[in-house]
Amino acid sequence: MNPMINVLQLGGPAGLYGAERWILALIRNLNPKKIKSIVSVIKDDPNLPVALCKKAEKMGFETKIFTAYGKCNFSAVEQLRQYILKNDIHIIHTHQYKQDLIGLLAVRGTKCKIISTPHGWSRDAGFKLQCYEALDRLIFPFFDAVVPLSPDLYNPLKHIPFLKKKLHLIQNGVDTAEIEECTSVASELVEWKSQGYFVIGYIGQLIHRKGIDILFNAVAMLDKGIKWKMALIGDGEQKSYLEQLAKDLKIYHNVNFFGFKNNRLKFLNGFDVFVLPSRLEGIPRCLMEALAAQKIVVTSDIPGSRELIQNGKTGYSFTLEEAQNLSVKIMYVMDNSKEAHELAINGKEKIFREYSAKRMAMEYERLFSSIISFNHNGKQ
């Protein structure tokens, strides 16, 4: 019988967004008798909240914070290498380009294997970010495995030389147990609903790729007699821009920027419709959570989201960048609540059937075991 496999998850040090929640869902569903999960981040700014490690600690997992202030401080490489050696880490599982690069450098000269899970690429990114992401893809052939979480991320990577044999498609999954355990509604939204407001909600980063500007333009076109409020859960670099846009569109009094919330699922429970107007996605985790919570969903018709939403079957989709089309879809949901709720039931069934974190974790357990070989003394 093989000994326990020690896996170090290396995630981002900022808020709990898609990739970070993905890590938490994975480790919660891995078999603790087979896999020991340690959650780590590289803190490159003293003001970062290291929310991933804090949440993992509350869940009972071991954590490690590597401190290396500055965007190009590679002292984290040696810190990480020493931790790998001292703690007999068998696999380091990295997420996103900075962690990928530092992780790859750190395992050199050790027996530790390295796996990367790409969570998506930026669209219309600045030149610097494009270069970082291009470099990330170029170093993938040096990993022991690369595991994109959707066909749309997997297929382009097949064309990178020497990578195809190391590629493993494991579909994204959501922690359905966590969603089922949360049954209450955030008090702020309870008050809105008692006043008769239709609640439009979004959970995620406030960045250009997420298309919140499209959503703002759409709600500005809603019929003037409609009583609505919008809840934005999350933070990001576009917050100031979006606040000004809301003022310019004269919708600011209807839009609430709640920022990052640990109780995001309580807010989700209070949404009448969840809207994801993204310009680019892998398979969006927030969308899977909304469907698992049996929420009515309207999303842009893009790859990734299209994996989950069949228009008129599991939710509604609108033409990307077309705010008027999105506005029409939101009003359709308001006017056809019975049909919309039937679609929400279909969406929930799809997630529980095809996208559970338990299924995802079992596939990762098999992958971890397949790339680790132990000798008769239980050593790697």
Image (cartoon, rainbow, N blue to C red):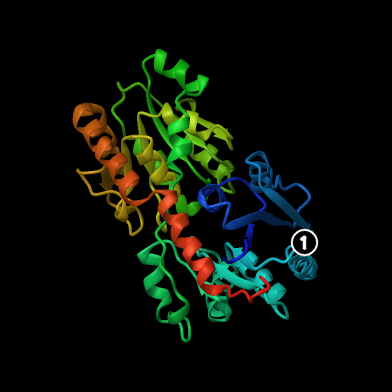
User: In which quarter of the view is residue 86 placed?
Assistant: bottom right
Nearest the viewer among 302 and 118 is 118
In the image, is residue 153 above or below residue 26? below
Q: Is residue 219 left or right of residue 104?
A: left
Label 1's element? loop
The answer to whether residue 217 of the structure is visible from this angle is no
Nearest the viewer among 251 and 315 is 315
User: Circle 1 sits on which residue?
Assistant: 70
In the image, is residue 365 above or below residue 226? below
* Quadrant in which the C terminus is drawn: bottom right
**Residue 95: x percent and y percent?**
58, 62
Could you tell me which residue is drawn at 23 percent across and 27 percent down? 337
Q: Is residue 350 left or right of residue 122?
A: left
**Residue 306: x percent and y percent?**
30, 54
* Quadrant in which the N terminus is drawn: bottom right
Q: Given the image, on which type of amino acid does mark 1 rest? A: Gly
